[in-house]
Image (tube, grey):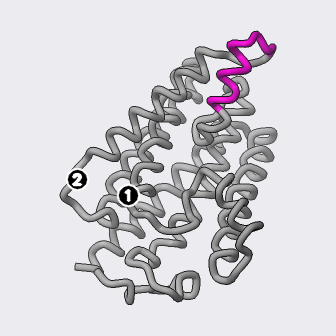
Amino acid sequence: MSGARRGPAGWLYPEGHPHAHLAPLLLVLTFASGLVDAVSFLGLGRVFVANMTGNVVFLGFALAGTGGLSAPASATALAAFTGGALLGGRWRRDTGAARLLSPLVAGQAGLVGVALAAQAWGLGRYAVLVPLAAGMGLQNAVVHRLGVPDLTTTVLTRTLTGLAADPLYPAALRRGLSVVALACGALAGALVHAGPGPVWVLGAVLVLLAAVGVAACRSGRSAV
């Protein structure tokens, strides 16, 4: 597939990219990442399931005896995330990355559904933490395989650095949208978590993932 296929998001990638048409879906996944980390940080005891940089730091703090942090929880999230990423990275290596977006997002949705059920039934921290972190590992694996510039869906340190150090259109616009999407997801997640509760946040994540999966499937069919 050539970089000429830009689709409705071609204005974000005027230089061309084979997967530029998936940029809106990646922004939705970025928003969903903010929702998921709101649930994990606010409801599961100061642990992340999407932001693994934060988890590594939390693990170090917890091992040093810092109060309010759990080394087992951070280590479990890291292990589950890595397992999900390993599966997503190894699965069907001979298939184009764009065609993997729909099935891997469907797998992530299934894991979020498991976490939602565990949350609703009060099965405890780890019953929610493990599927959420594994699902985020799947998401990051397929995003890594797509390689769409400036839209990683979770990690923003490099995005912010690029935004400040190289503030040129259209890269700055893409980076800015990524930052805003994650921040808005975290804000929405925190507000809903404090109101209706975490089950509603996970329900919203499930709806968003289903929408992304359907849209990615249609996009893949139109590319055939």
Picture quadrant of residue 144: bottom left
Q: Measuring 55% from the left and 18% from the top, which residue is drawn there?
A: 123
Quick one: label 1, few (<14), some, or many (20+) residues within 10 Å? Answer: some
The residue indicated by pointer 1 is 145
Looking at the image, is mark 1 or mark 2 earlier in the sequence? 2
Q: Indicate the position of residue 48 as horizontal and vertical percent values.
A: 64, 34
| Distance from the alpha carbon under mark 1 to that under mark 2 | 10 Å
Q: Which mark is residue 34?
A: none
Vertical side of 61 occupied by 83: above or below: below
The secondary structure that dominates the magenta segment is helix
Vertical side of 140 occupied by 5: above or below: below
The residue indicated by pointer 2 is 93
Quick one: label 2, few (<14), some, or many (20+) residues within 10 Å? Answer: few
Total number of numbered labels? 2
Q: Measuring 70% from the left and 41% from the top, which residue is drawn there?
A: 38
Badge 1 amino acid: Arg
Residue 174 vs residue 164: left or right?
left
Q: Secondary structure at mark 2?
A: loop
Q: Measuring 61% from the left and 23% from the top, which residue is drawn there?
A: 74
Q: Which quarter of the image is occupied by the N terminus?
A: bottom left
Q: Measuring 43% from the left and 38% from the top, which residue is drawn there?
A: 111
Residue nearest the observer in this picture, 174 or 212:
174
Residue 132 vs residue 201: left or right?
left
Residue extending farthest left: 94
Q: Secondary structure at mark 1?
A: helix
Q: Which residues are magenta?
A: 55-67
Q: Is residue 170 magenta?
A: no
Q: Which quarter of the image is occupied by the C terminus?
A: bottom left
Badge 2 amino acid: Arg
Residue extending farthest top: 65
Q: Indicate the position of residue 108 as horizontal and vertical percent values.
A: 43, 45
Q: Indicate the position of residue 175 as horizontal and vertical percent values.
A: 66, 68
